[in-house]
Amino acid sequence: QVQLLESGPGLVNLSQTLSLTCTVSGGSIIMHYYAWSWIRQTPGMGPEWMGVILKNGTTYYTPSLKSRISISRDTSKNQLSLRLVSMNPEDTAVYYCAREKDYNGTYYNASGVEDWGKGTLVTVTS
């Protein structure tokens, strides 16, 4: 069974850059049919799908974050990374990495997610 574990700073200063890592065990991040996403959630709101990286390394990002987000991977470590620049208070959320199946680039939501990490809380401080 695949397991995903997010790690990174719990506090990020206003206007600085967030960097998170997701370590995957129990399965390769380049396995067939699966893609790997970053999703975040604030209290009282539904999950916000942020972006995904496919088996071939292609990335898709939700339009509202496209200018600030970058998702990458290190296949030798079986890890994913999220980078979000110009952090502001609205970016305070629990950040999750996730595995989803058969992502085709035509939607920007979490409907295809099959496995979630435990999440990590990120708070933007001024």
Image: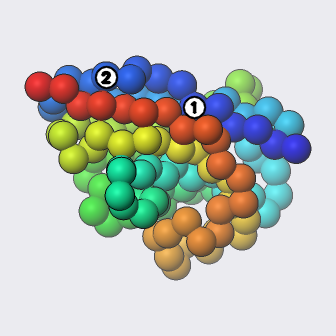
Quadrant, the N terminus: top right
Of labels 2 and 1, earlier in sequence is: 1
Nearest the viewer among 18 and 94 is: 94
Q: Is residue 43 above or below residue 4?
A: below
Q: Residue at x 74, y 43 (%)?
A: 29
Q: Which mark is residue 6?
A: 1
Spatial separation of the CA atoms under disc 2 and disc 1 = 14 Å
Q: Name the colour scheme.
A: rainbow
Q: Is residue 24 above or below residue 44?
A: above
Q: Is residue 37 above or below residue 106?
A: above
* Residue 73, horizontal then vertical, whole percent: 60, 37
What residue does disc 2 label? Answer: 11
Q: Quadrant of residue 6?
A: top right
- Give the SS element for disc 1: strand
Q: Residue at x 73, y 65 (%)?
A: 101
Q: Residues within 10 Å of mark 2 (few under 14, many from 20)?
A: few
Badge 1 amino acid: Glu
Quadrant, the C terminus: top left
* Residue 78, horizontal then vertical, whole percent: 72, 31
* Residue 59, horizontal then vertical, whole percent: 51, 56
Is 12 displayed left or right of 51 in the figure?
Answer: left
Badge 2 amino acid: Leu
Nearest the viewer among 62 and 59 is: 62
